[in-house]
Image: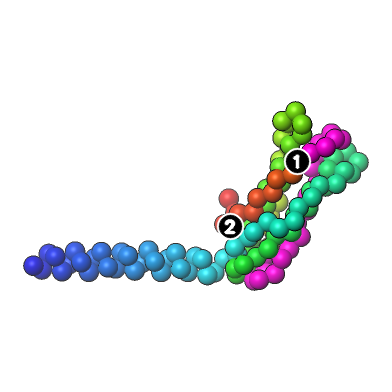
Amino acid sequence: MIARRVLAVALSLAALAALSGGYLRSCTGPRPVVGASWAEPLEGGMRAVATIQNGGGEGDVQVTFRLTDAQGRTFTREESAQLEKGKPAEVSTWIPAPAGPYQLEVEAEYPPR
């Protein structure tokens, strides 16, 4: 009987710790979402730009820009950005890539790797 109570209390405490840890993590950091993104040619490469919306708190995020050409070649660049609570941010980078048409993909992650 006592062993069941101890087990029930231990399981309840473990569940509470897991729930509170997930809750605090989701409340404290940014929740980045990529909005508009585009690439424009510059001499010797491309300038990639993305608007990152933030539905969470303040913190650093990692933004990955990936340009892919018609032959499947990929050019990648990572940047970090500081997001403020509830505010969008524009993040840009220069990617050394030959002239030509590209498909741009952008990902934003929190916490940064």
> Is residue 94 on the magenta stretch?
yes
Whether residue 40 is in magenta: the answer is: no
Q: Which residue is mark 2?
A: 110
Chain-order first, disc 1 or disc 2:
1
Q: Residue at x 89, y 44 (%)?
A: 42
Name which quarter of the figure residue 28 lies in. Answer: bottom right
Vertical order, 68 against 11 (above or below): above
Task: Tell me if 17 is positioned left or right of 90 in this view.
Answer: left
**Residue depicted at 60% across the width and 64% down the height:** 30
Which element carries disc 2, helix, strand or loop? loop
Q: Amino acid at mark 2?
A: Tyr
Name which residue lies at 32% across and 65% down. 15
Residue depicted at 70% across the width and 51% down the height: 79
Q: Where residue 10 sits: x, y (%)?
A: 24, 65
* Pointers 1 and 2 in contact (C-beta within 8 Å): no
Label 1, secondary structure: give it: strand
**Which residue of the protein is positioned furthest toward the left in this rendering?**
1
Picture coordinates of residue 94 (x, y %)?
A: 81, 46
Q: Is residue 18 left or right of residue 82?
A: left
Which quadrant: the N terminus? bottom left
On the question of residue 31 being in view, the answer is yes
Report the label total: 2
**Magenta stretch bounds:** 83-103
Q: Which amino acid, by three-letter code, is at mark 1?
A: Gln
Please give the residue where the numbered disc 1 appears in the rendered image: 103
Above or below for 69 versus 94: above
